[in-house]
Image (spheres, coloured by chain):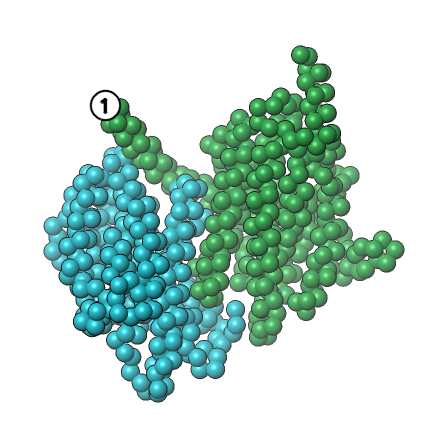
Chain colours: A cyan, B green
């Protein structure tokens, strides 16, 4: 059985992050607080799932290139595809960060989760776009523009809610308490991220962290929110050790592919 | 100018196919009819998001998931155009939403049926959107300008949705035994409710005559229904499936399909609130609205603070 390469794992990590966050955002579709914002968040979900598809398609090609039997699940004809990667792996194979799998909670939590992630993603994609892997660079360049918009939209909402009313401010504080511990993981490199940085494919995460802190502080200042000092951060998602939330996402998302294996949809 | 003169000018315009625009004089009853019909249509788009959103998180492939999100998002967009068009008649979105949430305003009964399997995403696209298009294409020529223009945009997107729906069913129809069963089951459940979407028979449709005189409506319910049945009876053969109507048969003399009797008791019962999902759908809308109240208040409060800041 062939082993996974760091490039494949890195690509899957990039894919899993945006699939899971996109999936979470899409749970809001039809239930948003304002029609215009229902549309906006659905749009972000669409962008993220579109990015995930690009990364998975690339990953599927890489998995297929293994000379031996792929360790990744295959569909009909033994072919690894974007869908077998998304729908037939179990939680321990998912490489998304813990932040992306957290439940939606209220609008404040969903907004803050998106903001934290977008503030990371813009710099990640900007660096990916100038990296040495031409496919990842092309995906990064295209997705960078989307991430910029997501960051602008979510920043505006963090400010609006932080500054708006007492209730919205309290809800933002609660969301911050719930989500903060998952932000550190974004910048603690998994082995494949260290490899990507050395190979000049992806960014050096320690450098990105500085920029992220600046971005978050700037928006928090305007929103009247305090940048937390908490040190402890929960990790593990990027290496397949997830919170309990992911299992439910996968159970729902993978239902049809699991119940009716080997079908065309 | 007397009301009679104004009414004559108005009806002359209608007869000459000149569009009525928001600032033009119009009879109160015309305005009321439009507000009722357009807001009912807007509400149907918004409530109609729910049965399909129900399958977004369970869509079987990434492509299907993306397409379904985009489709439901289009429906939100249609709701927006229609609320905006209704606002040109002097009734605001808040008031319209309030009418929906209190049950005073209606929405299309079709959305009170449940989506039980993935095949329902196909059947809704093919049958429900198909029936909607049949109703809506003539509305692109409705006498009220903002409504007609909104409908042009909506119809383009709807026909795209309809093709997507049919394609979902076509894929299932070529699939495994279980997938074919899913496909037939969805057609069986959605067929009659879709046929009912055209509303009561012409002799029991109280608004039709006036609406046709005002050119809000161009064809009667039964004319549109017949057209729909004729088209679907042909298309279902491509799927290798059947429509659940033993009386469906080609009538050489009429050059149309004859079809079985519609269960109007069910139709009126669902309109009155006794459909399988009436309560769930309305509750979901009310919940989204109520749970969003603090968000809307915060956005307003922030905007006011900003404008005060800019002023000082």
Residue depicted at 41% across the width and 51% down the height: A43
Name the residue that disc number 1 marks.
B312
Position of residue B309 measured from the top left corner of the image (x, y, whole percent): 24, 27
Relative to residue A117, is residue B62 depicted above or below?
below
From this view, report whether residue B87 is shown above or below residue A113: above
State left or right for residue B251 relative to residue A49. Answer: right
Could you tell whether B191 is left or right of A120 in the image? right
Residue B82 in percent (x, y) is at 54, 38
Instruction: Decide which of B245, A155 is in the foreground and name it.
Output: A155
Q: Quadrant of residue A11?
A: bottom left
As drawn, which residue projects farthest toward the right? Answer: B253
Decide if residue B16 is in sight here: yes
Question: From the image, which quarter does the N terminus of chain B lie in?
Answer: top right
- Which of the two residues, A264 or B159, is positioned nearer the viewer here? B159
Tally the marks.
Answer: 1
Residue at the spot x=15%, y=59% of the render? Answer: A207
Front-most of A113 and A58?
A: A58
Question: Residue pushed farthest top?
Answer: B1
Is residue A110 in view? no
Structural crowding at the residue carrying mark 1, measured as other residues with C-alpha within 10 Å and reported as few (<14), some (14–19) or many (≥20): few
In the image, B74 versus A230, the foreground residue is: B74
The residue sitting at 54% across, 29% down in the picture is B88
Indicate whether A240 appears above or below B211: below
Quarter of the picture containing the C terminus of chain B is top left
Q: Position of residue B269 (x, y in %)?
A: 64, 44
Image location (x, y in percent) of residue B236: 69, 63
- Place residue B109 in its image quadrant: top right
Q: Is residue A115 left or right of residue B200?
A: left
Q: Secondary structure at mark 1?
A: loop
């Amino acid at each position: 059985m062939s082993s996974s390469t760091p490039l494949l794992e890195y690509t899957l990590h990039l894919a899993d992050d945006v699939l899971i966050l996109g999936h979470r955002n899409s749970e809001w579709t039809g239930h948003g607080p304002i029609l215009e914002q229902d549309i906006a968040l659905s749009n972000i979900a669409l962008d993220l799932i579109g990015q995930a598809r690009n990364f998975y398609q690339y990953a599927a090609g890489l998995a297929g290139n293994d000379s031996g039997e792929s360790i990744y699940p295959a569909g009909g004809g033994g072919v690894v595809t974007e869908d077998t990667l998304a729908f037939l792996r179990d939680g321990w194979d998912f490489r998304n960060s813990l932040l992306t799998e957290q439940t939606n909670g209220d609008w404040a939590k969903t907004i803050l989760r998106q903001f934290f992630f977008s503030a990371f993603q813009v710099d990640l994609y900007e660096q990916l776009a100038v990296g040495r892997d031409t496919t990842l660079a092309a995906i990064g360049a295209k997705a960078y523009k989307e991430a910029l918009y997501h960051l602008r939209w979510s920043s505006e909402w963090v400010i609006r809610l932080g500054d708006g009313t007492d209730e919205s401010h309290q809800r933002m504080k609660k969301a911050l308490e719930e989500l903060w511990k998952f932000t550190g993981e974004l910048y603690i490199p998994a082995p494949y991220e260290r490899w990507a940085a050395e190979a000049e494919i992806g960014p050096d995460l320690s450098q990105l962290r500085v920029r992220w802190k600046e971005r978050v502080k700037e928006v928090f200042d305007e929103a009247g929110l305090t940048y937390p000092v908490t040190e402890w951060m929960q990790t593990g998602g990027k290496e397949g050790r997830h919170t309990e939330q992911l299992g439910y996402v996968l159970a729902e998302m993978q239902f049809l592919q699991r119940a009716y294996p080997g079908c065309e949809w | 100018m007397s009301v009679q003169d104004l009414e004559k000018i108005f009806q002359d315009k209608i007869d000459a196919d000149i569009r009525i625009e928001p600032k033009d004089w119009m009879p109160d009853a015309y305005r009321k009819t439009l507000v009722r019909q357009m807001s009912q249509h807007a509400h149907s788009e918004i409530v109609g998001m729910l049965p399909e959103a129900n399958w977004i998180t369970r869509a079987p492939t990434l492509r299907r998931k993306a397409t379904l999100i985009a489709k439901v998002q289009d429906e939100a967009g249609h709701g927006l155009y229609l609320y905006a068009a209704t606002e040109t008649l002097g009734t605001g979105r808040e008031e319209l939403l309030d009418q929906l949430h209190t049950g005073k305003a209606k929405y299309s009964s079709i959305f009170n049926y449940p989506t039980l399997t993935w095949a329902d995403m196909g059947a809704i696209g093919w049958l429900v959107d198909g029936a909607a298009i049949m109703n809506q294409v003539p509305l692109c020529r409705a006498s009220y300008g903002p409504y007609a223009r909104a409908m042009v945009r909506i119809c383009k997107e709807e026909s795209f949705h309809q093709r997507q729906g049919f394609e979902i069913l076509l894929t299932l129809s070529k699939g495994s035994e279980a997938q074919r069963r899913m496909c037939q089951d969805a057609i069986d459940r959605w067929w009659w409710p879709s046929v009912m979407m055209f509303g009561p028979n012409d002799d029991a449709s109280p608004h039709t005559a006036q609406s046709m005189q005002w050119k809000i409506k161009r064809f009667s319910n039964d004319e549109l229904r017949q057209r729909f049945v004729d088209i679907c009876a042909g298309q279902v053969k491509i799927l290798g499936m059947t429509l659940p109507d033993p009386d469906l048969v080609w009538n050489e003399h009429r050059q149309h399909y004859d079809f079985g009797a519609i269960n109007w008791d069910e139709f009126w019962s669902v309109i009155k609130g006794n459909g399988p999902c009436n309560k769930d759908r309305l509750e979901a809308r009310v919940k989204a609205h109520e749970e969003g109240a603090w968000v809307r208040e915060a956005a307003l409060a922030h905007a006011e603070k900003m404008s005060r800041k800019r002023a000082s």
